[in-house]
Image: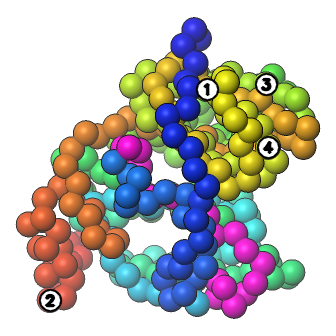
Amino acid sequence: MHNPRFLKDTWQSTPTQEGAGVRLRRAFGFHQAPGLDPFLLLDDFRGDNPDEYLPGFPWHPHRGIETITYMLDGQVEHGDSMGNTGVIGPGDVQWMTAGSGIIHQEMPKGDAAGKMGGFQLWANLPAAHKMMPPRYREVPAATIHEVEVDGAHIKVICGTVAGVTGPVRDIVTDPEYLDITLPAGTELRHPTPLGYTAFAYVLSGEGHCAPRSHLATANTLVVYADGDHVHLTAGPTGLRLLLVSGKPISEPIAWQGPIVMNTEEELWLAFAEYRNGTFIKG
């Protein structure tokens, strides 16, 4: 590893509302997505006020993307147009490939103290896979293994670290999704494939996410330039972050709301099918 990734850009996540009025912080979305291919959106929905999250995300469609929900606190109950139902709780992941189309709802609930939180990441699908059959991957916390590398603790959701491969596999954009905790003063050099998009989102603490970078604190989104590894250094309070990378798709995007296609014609067809009841393909 001789070519560290320097910072390409960095900013703070911003407050917004989604669904039926859920208050959250958006790390990136529509306007930033062209620089984060194949990733489209990252929402941070951590909170401890039930009035701000109980309205939830009632029935809505998706096509052409994957939604990845990672829970830290509380629960999210979900259901969909194929009859699937379930609950994900602390440490669980739901990796949903919308593909040709799915209609679902996600309703969050807090723990005994009213605390609820996690993250939802949207990843694009290539044109050749946009109309693939929808599928769910329910990933219980117990199947997400943690490894220690140079003092850093790494939960491997997707990808391979120190010989440990995460439970989510066979994703077309070859993503890596890690939850990394570095104790105070710890340094970690983590390899990343050349040519892949990579970003980090700081959950807590503070530290340097690249050589010669400014101190990054909670709610900071870091977008990396190309390189063969990421160099992280924790500050005096330690550092916890999500580190995500994936293979760019490099295709045109036509995006409105929860549907992401390649052309405007495909986009309007999707909405027409949603209105006339032919959105679900099987």
Q: Tell me the CA gap for discs 2 and 4.
A: 50 Å
Image position, residue 188 (x, y; %): 74, 25
Q: Tell me the SS state at disc 4.
A: strand
Q: Residue 7 placed where, x, y %? A: 55, 32
Q: Earlier in the sequence, mark 2 or mark 1?
A: 1
Under circle 2, the secondary element is: helix
Q: Residue furthest left?
A: 265
Q: For the residue marked with disc 3, what is the amino acid? A: Glu
Calculate the distance from the C-alpha at mark 1 to the C-alpha at mark 3. 10 Å
Q: Which label was assigned to residue 276?
A: 2
The residue wearing badge 4 is 206
Q: Is residue 145 left or right of residue 79?
A: right
For the residue carrying disc 2, how many other residues have a C-alpha within 10 Å: few (<14), some (14-19), or many (20+)? Answer: few
The residue carrying mark 1 is: 230
Q: State the colouring used for the structure image.
A: rainbow
Image quadrant where residue 87 sits: bottom right
> Start and end of the magenta stretch?
35-54
Q: How many marks?
A: 4
Q: Residue at x 58, y 18 (%)?
A: 4
Q: How crowded is the residue under tag 1: few (<14 C-alpha within 10 Å), some, or many (20+)?
A: many
Mark 3 / mark 4, whichever is N-terminal: 3
Query: Could you give the CA–CA distance between mark 3 and mark 4, rounded to whole angstroms?
Result: 13 Å
User: What amino acid is at disc 1?
Assistant: Val
Look at label 4 and name its amino acid: Glu
Residue 1's place in the image compared with 117, above or below, is: above
The answer to whether the residue labelled 3 contacts the one labelled 2, judged by CB atoms less than 8 Å apart, is no
Quarter of the figure with residue 145? top right
Residue in the picture at 66% in, 23% down: 211
Residue 117 location in percent, x, y? 70, 69
Question: Which of marks 3 and 1 precedes in the sequence?
Answer: 3
